[in-house]
Amino acid sequence: MPATLPVIPRREGEYWTARQRQMHSLHYVVSYRAAFKPELPDYFIRKFTKAGQVVGDPFCGRGTTVLQANILGRYAYANDINPFAVWLTRTKTNPVPLSEVCAFLATIDWEGSVAEKYPPELLLFYHPKTLQELLILKKRIRETKSPAACFVALLAVSRLHGHSPGFFSVYTMPQFSVPPKAQYRINRKRRQVPEYRPVAPRLLAKAKAALQDNLVAGIRRMSTHNCYTRRDARALREWQNECIDLIVTSPPFLNKVDYITNNWLEHWFLDIDPETFRSEMLQTNSLKEWQDYMGSFLQEVARVLKPGGICVIEAGDVLYRTQKINLDEIIAAALAAAGCRVLRPVEVLVQRQNFSKIAHCFAVTNNSKGTNTQRMLVLQKK
Ligand SMILES: C[S@@+](CC[C@H](N)C(=O)[O-])C[C@H]1O[C@@H](n2cnc3c(N)ncnc32)[C@H](O)[C@@H]1O
């Protein structure tokens, strides 16, 4: 790192609760790897913006920042290179009332048949009758394309894989799509074969849980003005100059998460071809490449932020080769190296936290796969 790096004040604390599932029920509708808790954007949106202002997330993932912005009466810009993430964000911010979910489900003939090809590996997860129902649902959603159909697709995506009878699948991981070979081993070890899991009642139960906190009309009122884009975060073409008051975002941490392999069942259900965007994903094990990417990204942040606007980047610590690296420091170095003087580092907030559930379930205790601390670098545009 260059010697000229500014010293950035650092504050450590518990800025939001460590308790799980305290925010709006829609936040928890779908699992997504490396998503942050809604409390994180909530904290910064309340701190730095007023109702009616504009919040953006260039790496929006499952849309946590964008949904929370709309819940708090802010407009939002969402971007991600993965069409699944953009779709998730758009659909979560366009919920429909339970009555519309029920009306849509009532139009489906679950006994029908669909002659559609599917990857044979799906039978490692689903009973043939469950799979047939999923194919019927997929076709109906494709034909209808209404907000209710999209929202039901979201509910279906949330039930594709998991560990309890509430999911369509045999026992598997809820947090990500297990690759077929690994699922084959799980099935053999547990001596399990997929049993029939009717689709409609599971969708209905999930709809009730997702919509229990209401606010459907309020979220939709704000989200009609949202902007959703699928671009590389270094070139947010549709985002106008100086249109954003606050960015709250979190880039991929080097190559710690494989967003394509981890979502293969979701991509299948939504007919998303990963080859259309694989090469554009920021996924590298080179720290230099990651830092250079961040330098260009920060130039784009400087373009879209209003003067005085704030950018909060969540970046944890990772194990790089044998060394622990704080990625917020790499981003600060990227800023200096890019010579981007209009963005001023304000502070780094370090959230004290315990290991996440997923870290526990993979026995990650040495910080090699996950991240120990959440570190938020706060920048301000002059
Ligand atoms: C850490 S996740 C963001 C999670 C998000 N904060 C949430 O709570 O769901 C990083 C996201 O960056 C996206 N991404 C990867 N490469 C990208 C690129 N070149 N441009 C824009 N987004 C990219 C990934 O698809 C992933 O959704």
Image (cartoon, rainbow, N blue to C red):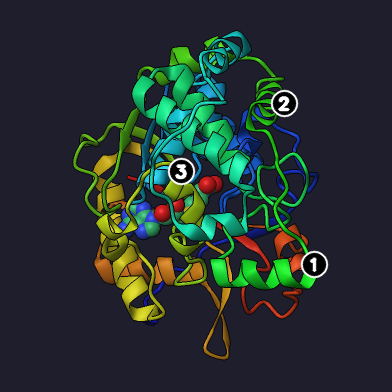
Q: Which residue is label 3 attached to?
A: 269
Which type of secondary structure does the marked residue at label 2 adopt?
helix
Q: Is residue 254 left or right of residue 99?
A: left
Question: Residues at badges 2 and 1 in contact (C-beta under 8 Å)?
Answer: no
**Identity of the residue drawn at 43% across and 25% down:** 140
Amino acid carrying label 1: it is: Arg
**Identity of the residue drawn at 73% across and 71% down:** 188
**Image spot of residue 141 (x, y percent):** 42, 27
**Image spot of residue 176 (x, y percent):** 59, 57
Is the shortest distance between ligand 1 and the CB of mark 3 under 8 Å? no
Q: Which residue is label 1 attached to?
A: 190
For residue 314, say whether it is visible. Answer: no
Q: Is residue 121 above or below residue 18?
A: below
Amino acid carrying label 2: it is: Ala
The quadrant in which residue 244 appears is top left
Amino acid carrying label 3: it is: Phe
